[in-house]
Amino acid sequence: MMLNVFLREGYLYKKSQLFSKCGYEDTADDKDAFKSMMTELKRKRLIKSRRKKGSRESADDDASLISEDDVEYDEYIGTEENEIQYLFRFVGMIFFYDRVIYVYPKYIELEEAESEESKKYLYEKMKQALNVIRKHQGKVFSLDVPLMLEEVDKGEELTELSIILFLISDYTENGLYCESEQIIELNGDGEILWGRTVEEYYPLIKDNSPFYFDVLTSRRKDNSMNYFVRLHKYILTDASNQIEKTGITGLFSLPQIELSDSLIDEFGDIEYILNAIMNEIGNQFDDRKIAVLHAMYLYLKHKYSNDPLYTNKNDLGLSFFGTRSFHLVWEDVIDSVYVSHKKMTFGKIQEKYNPTLDYYLQLPNGISRQIEKSDALEDYIEKPEWYHRDSETSDYKLYLPSATFIPDYLRFSDDNDEFYILDAKYYVPKWFVTGKNEYKIERQPGVEDVAKQYLYYFVFKELLDNNAIDITHVKNYFIMPTEDKDKDVGYVRIGFFEKIFSNIFKIRIKKLNASNLFDCYLQGTELDVSTIP
């Protein structure tokens, strides 16, 4: 029976709190197990230590856990204590022997999960969040399992659960590796392929009608006993059994798969199997089959190899699924649900929206500029120009960097009379009043984030002016998640911009219900950006 534990992302926990919440008791075995778990969490970069300035560690603090503590790290929730505290920089689930730790997103303002009602509530929220993470990661990697291997080479850990989810999802959508194979024959007994026959053979013309002495035919060959089909069945069955033991099949709505009663030894030793898979990859041209073969390779490598990049043997029972970058998930949700035009070409924007935009610009300095229809909206943002002085000629040569400002979200309204600049901010700001009656805010986006929102307008000002979208029709928002109703909670401004530009916008702060947006994201539903309150 797995013990379910619910902990909040970014929340400051004392070691004693974590010990208790994870269900450990005051015994020597439990103390050792907890210490091992904490060591693995730190090694996997899932938790971070935090200590208040001037505080000191106690005698029972493990130096390895606090060696990378960051006094200046302010992205935390809760109250600082005069002792070492720990916070999770991760959203997802962690398996440690008979425990499943669910780390739920920080915007869910529930610090205690002791009652059955609260645990049920958090379980449903985690089920939704994990499926959102799963979809986001699927979009990032798609069928590009080699890209996942590149991440491993860069030092990122590819978890066994990620591979299992890929394999099961692919199977439910596409079936086995190759259940049957199309065989094309000359004058066979199968269906005649008239298109191929006409292309490749000349007919005899009789009475103005063509007659073919030879025809190409097609039949299906049963591949159920193919080595890689059988191996695929074994891996799917084995992986499904592993997931069933964790009790999390309901989280992902995964089917129970029972396709094989084979043993791994029936396919040869592990090195033989891995070499066979790599040889098959070299002979394949179908992207989906190559991806499945890579995933099969990774699964076996994880389970049986001694390679430290893949093996779980040194993990002391700890594995996980989730993300250390939930802010990227939040950005993807906003971009997808409200359909950003950032990556859309000007030509496609012209085709889709009326009245069409005018892309011939007459700039204030008298220079004209024609925007290409093949350019994406984000390409309109110019790169900084860096000039380097040549030591011999004293001339300055222009050097361009590879990147420039990249806004989260850009969009013209359907009538092209408004322009939206959104920044998906995964923050939980705290507004409070001090004992001295001072109004303060903490854990908010930085001043550079605010300045960039103004800058994005100035970048597009010429284009907007040329299309009669003045500054009063620019909608500039910070979008933050909440479990409450959608609402406008305020704004942020930088005063000196108002001294330079009349009618300059304020950057509105919008809190949107994350659960509703996640449902839309998972279902592929689009929302009108103008409905944001």
Image (cartoon, rainbow, N blue to C red):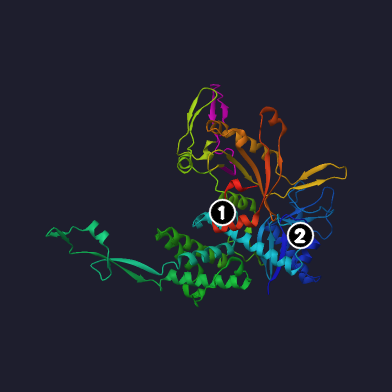
Q: Split into 4 quadrants, where in the image is the N terminus?
A: bottom right
Nearest the camera: 12 or 120? Answer: 120
Q: Is residue 499 visible?
A: yes
- The answer to whether 432 appears left or right of 473 in the picture is right
Determine which of the numbered discs, if any, sits on residue 151 in the image. Answer: 1
- 224 w.r.t. 38: above or below: below
Residue drawn at (47%, 72%) of the image: 267
- 116 w.r.t. 426: above or below: below
- The answer to whether 224 appears left or right of 454 in the picture is left
Nearest the camera: 291 or 362? Answer: 362
What residue range appears in magenta? 381-410
Q: Quadrant of residue 418?
A: top right
Estimate how packed mark 2 is, as few (under 14), some (14 to 19) or many (20 or more) residues with alpha carbons within 10 Å.
Answer: some
Question: Looking at the picture, how far across and down is residue 18, in whole percent?
Answer: 77, 63
Amino acid type assigned to the residue bearing label 1 in the image = Glu
Amino acid type assigned to the residue bearing label 2 in the image = Glu
Element class at badge 1:
helix
| Mark 1 or mark 2, whichever is nearer to me | 2
Determine which of the numbered discs, if any, sits on residue 111 in the image. Answer: 2
